[in-house]
Amino acid sequence: MSFLTAGLRKLLSYVRVRSGRVARFASRFNRVWRYGWDMVFWSHMLGRKHDPIPIEFPNRVLQEKGVSRQPPALHVSGPNEAASLWDNGFAAVNATLLLNLNAPDVLSSVRYAHPAPAFQGVYLWDSAFIAQVWRLWEPEAARDAILAVLELRDGARMQHVVADFVSSKYTQPPLLAWSLLRCCPLGDAEGLAVLSRAYPHLRDYNEWLNGNRRTQHGLYAWAHPYESGIDNSPRFSSRDESAFVDTRSMESPDFSAYMVLQNESLAEIARRVDDLQAAARFSEQAEEIRDAMNALLWSDEDGLYYDRDVASGKLLRHKTIAALLPLWAGVPDDERAGRLIEHAVDPRSFGTPIPLPSVARDSPDFVLDMWRGPVWINTAFAVIQGLERYGRLEEAGELSARLCEGVYRTFANERRVFEFYDPERFDICRLHRKQGNRWKQFTLGGKPVSEFVGWSGLVNTLVIENLIGLREGATGTLELRPLIPQRLAGMAFSIRLPAYGLAITVERTAAGGVCGVVRSATGIQRFDAPFGEAMAIGAAGNNARDIRCDSATSL
């Protein structure tokens, strides 16, 4: 059977076409046929309006997906009547995440994750973000999601998408190195082996991008709007995509920021696999790109980074989420970062109730259609990562909480996890998907795609890493730095993490600090600390505050 599967996989690699509506339609028809049972089963489970979502799954269901652990489980308690929304929303993300995981088949020899039943292929940047959700549940599945993209590469180029009958001639945001590095903690022998296996392909991809997407000014330009991942942004096209700009003539702040992140990540990977000369080169390239971005893409008048027309040198002033993404890559100095963050938290701009929309609320380009206004969790997540990078922890915690609340409240109303969200409401009534594009309406519908954890599942990652605050420290040890906002004081966030053997409860105190308890097989650790201070879990002698251990217990 495995021999037959491998043969079919090889045959499909020969017959795939890279464009054509007939092929795309055939691929989507095939997806519906293959995943009809999944859709019926999971939609029934998630669709019962008043029933709680199961926090654990039958072993048979897990085994079919090759998953060895139960998922993280969240319980939020407190005086706020909406506390239970968090529990159900968190569990729904886990259920949808499991739905979208595929065992090895004729498409890929390793497990892969598709974004939604409507998108059955392997997508580059979706896989990078999906891995960040799986990482805290089943680290092996997280790494597999990235390795599948590497397996399906076209020479040195990582492909935008590969499905049963189609593949893409484009690439997508280069986030694989960043994502894989986060999936391979220091001191993890298995993770180091994966990095060693992936490194040559990631290095070659970086060189391919330098040779095929870099401009004469040391910045980067997308070959097509679809390559950017933000298809119908006002930067690139009309709302219905009847007209596109030539993105090859635009030096882009998002692409360039991703390349900084990629080179930073490659430098660290190179150090871990003892390629020290290459590590130095990657670090140098990251700095070169930062310098070029600050020299050419910054608008001092607006306090934002913009696309730049290569020929004229003119900045193309569209106030979109791309203008904030340089925060993620550490591009601006502190003064410029402060100006970007002002936009991020301003309720008239990007600080909407569900925060960080794809286009600023006060922009004339704003409309509730895909990348022209709605909130996308992946780019919002990226900006929040940037706030943390610059030490703006109160703002990072507040935006994280509002983003999670938005997704979970919308789930409570709609019983679905969606592709994108209304920045001002907890439903999808006002949202559109490329309105006027009849082909897209026919193949994908006019509303956000549902059962989507291409990146919407990142809200669960924000709960664990930002609000509860569990993360890997600089030396590879686990640290706790809760960022629960002050307005949620009195609400206790409890998480069970089978992958780590931990159960953690944290709370923001009325006095402004944080307190809680960490339970593991080796003991109970209690803490009471100032907001924003990192605490080492189960280890002494680090720079972070050590949590005191009171007594031994088992989970």
Image: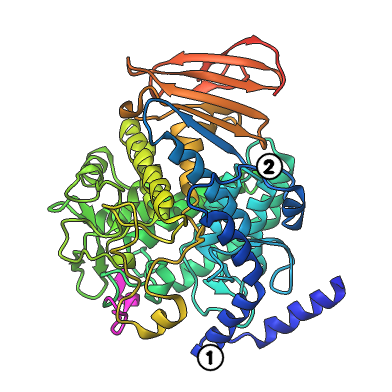
In the image, farthest residue toward the top = 550
Amino acid under disc 1: Val
Question: In the image, 126: left or right of 410?
Answer: right
Residue under the point 68% across and 47% down? 57
Residue under the point 44% across and 41% down? 85
Q: How many C-alpha atoms fall within 10 Å of the one at disc 1: few (<14), some, or many (≥20)?
A: few
Residue span colored magenta:
239-251
- Which quadrant holds residue 191? top right
Count the labels in the image.
Answer: 2
- Which quadrant holds residue 146? bottom right
- Of 71 and 522, the residue lying toward us: 71
Magenta stretch: dominant SS? Answer: loop
Q: Earlier in the sequence, mark 2 or mark 1?
A: 1
Does residue 528 appear anywhere in the picture?
yes
Task: List the residue tagged with mark 1.
Answer: 22
Quarter of the picture containing the C terminus is top right
Task: List the residue tagged with mark 2.
Answer: 70
Amino acid under disc 2: Gln
SS class, disc 2: loop
Quarter of the picture containing the N terminus is bottom right
